[in-house]
Image: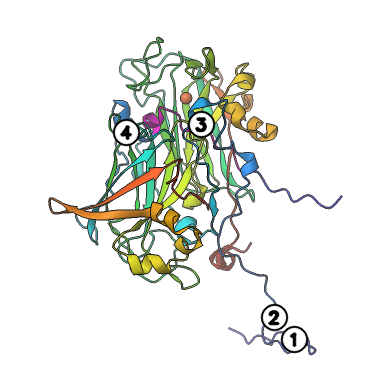
Amino acid sequence: MPQPLNYLKETASQTAGPYVHIGLIPAMAGFDIFEKNFSNVLVTPNTQGERITLEGKVIDGSGTPLRDVLLEIWQANAAGRYNHPADRSTGPLDEEFRGWGRAGSDFESGLVTFETIKPGAIIDKTGRKGAPHINVWIVARGINIGLNTRLYFSDEEAANAADPVLSLIEQPMRRSTLIAKRSERAGKIVYAFTINLQGPEETVFFDV
Amino acid sequence: MHAQAPALRDPRLNRPEPFTPPLGDGGFFQRDRSMHPPAHAPGYKSSVLRSPRQALLSLETSVSEITGPVFGHNDLGPLDNDLIRNYAKDGDPVGERIIVHGRVLDETGRGVPDTLVEFWQANAGGRYRHKKDTYLAPIDPNFGGCGRALTDDTGYYYFRTVKPGPYPWRNYVNSWRPAHIHFSVFGSGFAQRLITQMYFEGDPLIPVCPILTTIPDKDALERLVAPLDLNASTPFDSLAYRFDIVLRGRRSTYFENRTAGN
Ligand SMILES: [Fe+2]
């Protein structure tokens, strides 16, 4: 027998369940407990960048919006830099932007919203430029392990066409499942998205 | 400073630099999905319409995944890891007082420092403080049921609570959840993000739970069961349970090799 390698095994995932709000967004469960709470607003008045609203739903295999889903987003700042030491690109950090937020869907409509900024293009460790995007992580009752996907921007056609991740998706029609659509509403920039868990327009999910 | 002798060089090699071990890129080890429940697990009925059916697209972890949100003590309040006190109105909550403690590690066995751990649970009667929970067991006026902690520089965390009760749920007509605490953990990169549940040693509902048994690997399932840790208990006050959480391992980075060795 060779020497054992002795790596540990990753802890198994379990569903977040229907009451995920208690731990992660207690106000949505109906009570107030922590002094400081996390939210779906990623910006302060001093954050650099174009203000945008992300707005969308997660749809199950019957076409029904999930009304107990929780999304988290993680994104670079307006200069394309993540607020984390492992991002060694040279764009400026923005102290007014952590780049992370979480939101529960509305209990009636299933609508999920985030108030954030549009990230800049990402420079990867190889120096390759990636299209601006927002990383999304989805948990809910019935989802046994968190789902990873990305949102790209409909007004970034040239960058999207050159993006190394979008280019990995074999079927062009499936690429479109990751594109949030830009519109303007009452002076605000809104990007609309739909995440389909199943069906002919099933969203591309990643094993990252 | 004194002058250093030039490095000895093998004359057969026309190589100006000595060999150095290949440096990792900080990417994560490929996830071993056999350690996790499949997305589609028909015994847990809610998964049927909520499970993707296409193959996941495998990505090498890029800067978008090796980075993740950074949290600090400023994000927390002083009672956040004390569920006995953080919602107490006119006394302590009802139930068995327990301490839950352990380490957040990665697959290489290194502690994950300064990472946010969040937890939530039902009260001692199995009832959640949630507007959608209608189980007949009563709300405890002194128990909120959630808390959070930041691991220390060795990855250690702890909190105090009361042991949650089992509760019925709609799956089969007589399905009951074993007593459990939900955990959410971040790690250092977004690809380590994990939600799981901790169970209690000796609970007879464990082998018949439709959610727990979505995990196909018996050892992976048992690693979610926290043993009683009598040595960590507080005499005449609280029992203790030990729960270690393992996140995905990372290839070492140039940065880490340079500063800390490997
Ligand atoms: Fe639960």
Q: Magenta stretch?
A: A10-23
Where residue A115 sits in the image (x, y, percent)?
Answer: 25, 49
Where residue B107 sits in the image (x, y, percent)?
Answer: 63, 48
* Gap between marks 1 and 2 measured at Cα: 8 Å
Q: Nearer the viewer, mark 1 or mark 3?
A: 3
Query: What colouring does the structure picture have?
Result: rainbow
SS at mark 3 in the image? loop
| Residue B221 occupies quadrant | top right
Type of the residue with mark 1: Arg
SS at mark 1 in the image? loop
The residue shown at (29%, 26%) is A31
Q: Name which of mark 1 and mark 2 comes first in the sequence.
A: 1
Type of the residue with mark 2: Pro
Q: Which residue is mark 2?
A: B18
Q: Which residue is mark 1?
A: B9
Residue density around tag 4, few if under 14, some if 14–19, many if 20 or more, within 10 Å: many
* Gap between marks 4 and 3 measured at Cα: 35 Å
Q: Nearer the viewer, residue A60 or B82?
A: A60
Q: As drawn, is B3 to the left or to the right of B196? A: right
Query: The residue marked by circle 1 belongs to what chain?
Result: B
